[in-house]
Amino acid sequence: MSSEGNALKLTTTKVDVEQPSTGNIVTAAVAKLISNSNNNNINNDGPTSSGCSATGGTAGGAPATTSLSGDDVQRRRETQLRQHSFFQLRIHLISGHNLVAMDKSGTSDPYVKFKVGGRLLYKSKTVHKDLNPVWDETFVVPVEDPFQPINIKVFDYDWGLQDDFMGSAKLVLTSLELNRAEDLTIKLEDAQRANKDLGEIKLGVTLWPKTQEDKEQYFQRNPKLADASRRLKSQIWSSVVTIVLIEAKGLPPDTENGLNDVYVRFRLGNEKYKSKTSYRARWLEQFDLHLFDDDQLLELIVCGKYNTYGKCTIDLRSLPRERTHGMWQPLEECTGEVHIMLTISGTTASETITDLTSYREDPKERTQQQKRYAWHRSLQNLRDVGHLTVKVFGATGLAAADIGGKSDPFVVLELINARLQTQTEYKTLTPNWNKIFTFNVKDMSSVLDITVFDEDRDHKVEFLGRVMIPLLRIRNGEKRWYALKDKKMYSRAKGTQPQILLEMTVVWSKVRAALRVLEPKEEKLVQQEAKFKRQLFLRNVTRLKAVIMYFIEVGQFVQSCFEWESPFRSFIALVLWICGCIWFDISTIPAAALLYLLKNWLIRWLTGASSPSTADEYDVASDDEDDDDKEKEEKKTIKERLQAIQEVSQSVQNTIGYLASLGESVKNTFNFSVPELSWLTACLLLIACLVLHYVPIRVLLLLWGLVKFSRRLVRPHSVPNNEVLDLLSRVPDDEEIIMWRELPLHSTPEMARRDPRKKHKTS
């Protein structure tokens, strides 16, 4: 008897049988007798077969009646199975017991493969040096033909050699009850070792029918079933869970080694993620897990190099969708807690709160929002600055990321640390997402980052385009196209004039927004630090040189007044200098800055544009391929030797970039690159003039000293800040201005011509 053809011998904890039909008393009595007999066999005689007619014995009953009852039950099950065209099978691989030893040391390294028709459904992890392994793994697979058994094979892993076969069995799906979880104990067999006990494995199995719509949805996502060798490929997920792992606190230190090499393991269904190790328990990592309807418990375990600190479980069913949740999650085994940000979005269901096709705007809700941010309520709930609504309709001209000339695009929307995404539209270059999202605005100077990705195999992503929209530049209720840019935000993305159709509305309180600008800016938690590159280093040096040259030119202008190169200009400067020395006051300093600010505004107002166009003069040369190849070659050959130099160079590069950015922000504050912030600066300068003029400087210095010395006593947890730098951090530098600049549209998109709403309005 072959290992593929033998019948499955199993023990099940399910001891009830189907209820007999009405009026058939004899069959009911026989069924009860069979149930009691099976219970006795399970408790006393060891494993028996359940649902396998080839080995279905009973104890002491009438053989003919037992066989007839078993056939009737089997026929009824097969009839139920034929009524459905699609199923999902959930298998919980629990453990193995008394497996055969295949290594010389008397142990084995077992793992399990599940196959159907020669196609691999799932491969478990390898448990080393254990004849009683515990896998504890769960996976879900689609089933079209329930009459085709699933082959279960156990192997012993050998490094560098062919793995040894340890035994096999068959899982007959026709022996399972629909919609009922069953715990099975499977005996392994091998044709070459027919008389040898090869051990057993324990499974939890559930088979439930699905609708025709579910089947079509599955085949839409899995067009090539021959490539479904990976377990995630064969599943139908309902949402995407985006997790930002920030930090942990309160972890008990190891008695010998302290807090060392801490990492976190996440598990959601059959998907897992392991974070990087951190000495200070601060990670700032972002990753995605896929949510299935049957598995919505997120497990989190905090581990160290030598021990496990604690774990916790989060029930995702209790969290509202399409919203970013910041939470401190306490651990069960210790007093520590973990700080994470979690978002459930990308819902594939058609009827969701973000479905734009079924969305109807509520006038009452809009009126409540306007009242919420009215001027007379400006001092209420200062953290609530505004409310942003984004409608994502569709896109055209996207680049083809797949071999077949299509893409599987979806959109990610990020507002600082809030992150939402649409569902994936498969096999198209002109997707229609039709989603509506809302964000709570905490800072009106922030920027909405919209990125289009292509979903690749195993849920990896590929960049398709990006656009960044400052909230202060949003035109409420305007449905328009935005050109997509490349990763560096300097030029147009690949494709046929790629663009995305959006409509945005933002309601905000100007007073709260102005007060928020004077507080520390919220930093994005997960952002990749730029590595050292020669081209980037030279670009930052050029930026800093331009800022320095700007101040040098101002100094040369002043020096030219002293040198009387232009008599008229020098005479005016002399009169101003004399007047300034006679009537000098501390308020003269902000007054001079205010006059310079007003001068630039007047130039902008008269000319209709800002001072020299940054976008036209800025050099946006990118790294060429030769530099990238050279850098890779250097990493391969002298990586260890240059590691220390690279860290220093990276620090210098980023510091120069920061100084250049700060200088550009100062310049752009006074040339009205962001008029709202420039006008706010003008108001602050005017207030500073009045205060410095009427309040003696010694009083101001005294009050300033008292505030600074008492800050730690009054507010021990406050963040030390510099109001001037906080304001400048909101002003974009020259690179950000380029990123936010909109590219011109060359033609009317095809989607706009076939927009049903637009046709309805015109009609």
Image: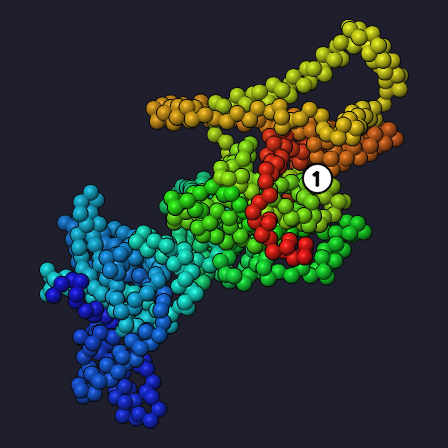
Decide: few, some or many residues near mark 1? Use Cα within 10 Å; few <14, some 14-19, many ≥20. Answer: many
The quadrant of the image that shows the C terminus is bottom right
Percent position of residue 309, x then y: 43, 51
Percent position of residue 144, x then y: 32, 65
Instruction: Tell me the quarter of the picture where residue 686 sits.
Output: top right
Query: In the image, what residue type sits under mark 1?
Result: Val
Percent position of residue 91, x then y: 33, 63
Q: Residue at x 44, y 47 (%)?
A: 407
Color scheme of the displayed model? rainbow
Instruction: Tell me the quarter of the picture where residue 481 sits.
Output: top right
Asked if residue 698 lies left or right of residue 469, the reply is right
Q: Is residue 48 above or below residue 556?
A: below
Q: Residue at x 69, y 26 (%)?
A: 667
In depth, the one of 218 and 691 nearer the eye is 218
Asked whether the viewer can see residue 716, the reply is no
Asked if residue 637 lies left or right of residue 505, the reply is left
User: What residue does disc 1 label?
Assistant: 517
Q: Residue at x 20, y 83 (%)?
A: 67
In depth, the one of 407 and 587 nearer the eye is 407
The quadrant of the image that shows the N terminus is bottom left
In depth, the one of 24 and 711 nearer the eye is 24
In depth, the one of 504 and 338 nearer the eye is 504
Name of the residue lying farthest toward the front: 763
Asked if residue 134 lies left or right of residue 698, the reply is left
Percent position of residue 567, x then y: 83, 7
